[in-house]
Amino acid sequence: MLWESILPKAIAGEGASADAADLRMDSDAFAGFYERSARSLWAYLTRVSGDPALADDLMQESYVRFLSAARPPSLEDGEVASRRYLFRIATNLLRDHWRRPHPASLEDLPEEFFAARCDVAQNDSVAMLIPAMARMKPRERQLLWLAHAEGYSHQEIAEVTGLGSASIRLLLFRARRKIARLLREPASSGRLRSMGRLP
Amino acid sequence: MTLRSCSRDAEVRRLLELGHWPQSCTPELRAHVERCKACGDLVLVTMAFRRARAETMNAVQLPPPGILWWRAQLRRRNAAVERIHKPIVGAQIFAFAVTLVITVGFLAWQVRDGWNWMKWLASLAQSQVFHWEVLWPFASAKSAAGFLSLVPALALLALASGVVLYLGSEKHNS
């Protein structure tokens, strides 16, 4: 049948040139990229969403979308570009998740609920961050994580989040000041002193 | 809110990025960080996030990459099949529209002839002279031409119906 002969070409090329199709990751290259990037992506999704189960789902969906995208970053663009593209997909998935109607908004959830679901917290440094993160807005959590955990520049954060790079600096400054104040609150000051972060 | 950055902000950032804080920093810089609120916030937040990242990364059980790879292949294949089906659906709609137009035209033509025939029957009842030859509608040259045009129209209708049925069954089977 005619479409059976057309189908492999359509899958490989998808309207682009054959050279572009050749630059796609093969399964071995993807396995390497996945091993190097999956843990940091899962950490990002878990800490920003506050839900490890949701992070599992969104991480898998991010990789599937990354691989089946019409124009993903090619091998020539390098792993940094692929990583940034992956984080952008994950950020969009998070935004879509928050836009969907839910029985309760993330903002409305009590702090105990948030802390109970993040059972990956093992020691004080994470334990003191969880309640502080729960009191931040989703966008603030995204910006803070990308800037301070992933070490992205303002330009890179703008590419990942779709925000203007000029506004990133101000938003990040406000978010950092807010979370620093929350981390310095009396409840957590004892833990901070024990870590040597406060005089 | 004023956005003031400290003059030593870049220096502190560089040490944090390299992971050299606080081991490789001078006592003078450490004293500055304790006094400066902006630098203190930067150190506090960055250290907390870096540690949280390291711990969270160790807590994950990753699914094997092969599953994701094949899921993506399957999705791409389905998307390609959908793209190919789009023109086929268009052709089916076109074939159905053509068939519908021909059918409506044929029926209109037949209704008009039937209406003429009914009028003729009505006039026959009032007629004084009965002409037997007019009972056969194809006896005249005009009726013969109508019959000749009816045959290809019926053939075209049958062909179009066959195409529609074939395409419909193809879509159903796939």
Image: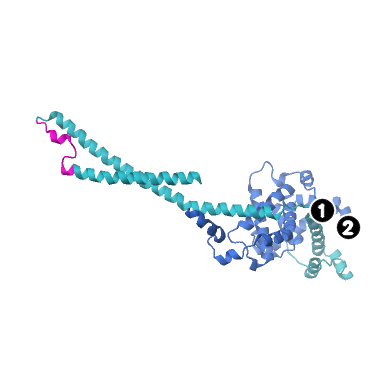
Chain colours: A blue, B cyan
Q: Percent from the top left, x then y, of residue A100?
A: 63, 46
Q: Residue furthest front?
A: A1
Mark 1 or mark 2: name the one nearer the start of the chain: 1
**Secondary structure of residue under mark 1:** helix
Mark 1 belongs to which amino acid?
A: Val
Q: Which residue is mark 1?
A: A126
Question: How packed is label 1: few (under 14 Cα within 10 Å), some, or many (20 or more)?
Answer: many
Q: State whether residue B25 is above or below residue A15.
A: below
Q: Chain of mark 2?
A: A
Q: Percent from the top left, x then y, of residue B111?
A: 26, 38
Quadrant showing the N terminus of chain B: bottom right
Q: Is residue B15 left or right of residue B142?
A: right
The quadrant in which residue A16 appears is bottom right
Q: State whether residue B161 is above or below residue A143.
A: above
Q: Is residue B134 magenta?
A: yes
Q: Residue furthest left?
A: B129
